[in-house]
Image (tube, rainbow, N blue to C red):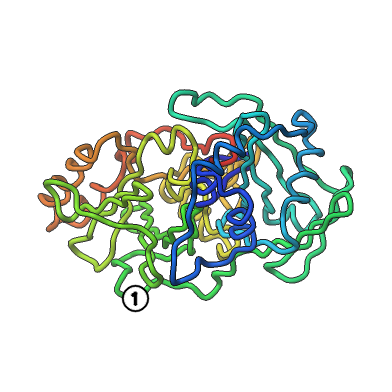
Amino acid sequence: MSTTGYRMSTLVRLLHAGVLGAAATFYATGGACAPDRPRLSTNEAYVEETLRATELGISDPLSVLAFVLESLPDRVKVYPTENYYYFRFTHDGTPYAGSIRLPPGDRDEGKIEFGYYKDLSEWSDAMAGDVHLIAGPAQGLEMERLDRFAYRLTFRNKSVVFMLNDLSEVRPPAAALGADETFLGPIFDESGVRFFLLFNAKLKLFHYVLDETVRVADDLSATAGADRILVGRRTGFAFYRDHLVDRKILIGAYEGNSRINNYFDGPFDQLPENFIQGEELRGAIVASDPGVKGQLDRLGNYLHEEGRYLIHPYMLYHRQSDLLAIHACAARSVGRPAVYYRCFLASPPEESTPKRSPARRSKR
């Protein structure tokens, strides 16, 4: 994703299907699905929500913020590691997506990022009616820090505690780290998939490695013609079973998901900003791209313009067959690690232009 503030969760699927009451409350409270039976979504509920007459000052961001908070329970869980709480709603037959973000630093000054926009689709992928603002004490918002990972947000007599995702103790297994690699932090993507962000100091490249210390909520199947490439049925994420280390490296995300900015565009916009140690991230970025030296803060945000440095080594593919070139490269280079691991880059570093995350948008 990008940088002015938005996303969501598996809530999109349930809401598209119309389970707006129980399902919205269920996901807002951060509960886990009951282990015995799945939840049923119906077209009936979707149609009735779409046809329902609604009243909302959609052009007034503070009125929309009040509506969102009033619709939430008293405590919610913020799963994504860039601290976005995604939501969506339908108003006058039009679906909207948005987010509340609690950025590091700003949240301790009582500020949030809030935004929403008309949802994107394959047939209408141009942003329209998008709103983004920094809200804080000047807008009547109160923020109370309860502990490192808990903040109480109060606005217009409604208070909600936002529980940030504490992954402080998450580490990759030693067997998942290659030579010369450093673990930069854990990522919880808005897709519900977890990753380890790694940097190879010798080769000066990044990898997103699948975290298999927890259950992976996807059905990974081998692609035709390359059994080392595994593609998720739910997410579209493509992984490569590394020849040299026991792990799966993210090599692709489906291009259509990236274009419409949904939950499955990959982890580039969910960096582990609550868990970055000192200068590790900035140092890794500058090592890989010396041209940005002096332009970034320690979390990779640009100092003099909007946006965050784009760590996006994986391909955006149209068809699974697009991924076969990666397998061919890896298979012929497996004996030469310096070449082999570059096979997983979307483009070689020498061909890259300066990398900037686009302006953040809410997720579908």
Q: Residue at point 18% right, 55% down?
A: 228
Badge 1: residue crowd in 10 Å (few <14, some 14–19, many ≥20): few
Indicate the position of residue 322 as horizontal and vertical percent values: 22, 37
As shown in the figure, which amino acid type bears the numbered disc 1?
Ala
For the residue pair 53 and 296, the one nearer the viewer reads as 53
Residue 35 falls in which quadrant of the image?
A: bottom left
Q: Depth check: give the residue in front, 121 or 181.
A: 121
Q: Which residue is mark 1?
A: 174
Left/right of residue 306 with respect to residue 175 in the rendered view: right
246 w.r.t. 264: above or below: below
SS under mark 1 = helix
Front residue of this view, candidates 97 and 286 = 97
Q: Residue at x 49, y 23 (%)?
A: 124
Q: Is residue 292 left or right of residue 137?
A: left
Q: Which residue is painted at 27% across and 50% down in the image?
A: 231
**Residue sitting nearer the eye, 39 or 141:** 39
Q: Quadrant of residue 108?
A: bottom right
In this rendering, the answer to whether 233 lies above or below 122 is: below
Q: Is residue 161 left or right of residue 157?
A: left
Residue 361 spot, x, y in % from top left: 59, 37
Q: Is residue 49 left or right of residue 68?
A: left
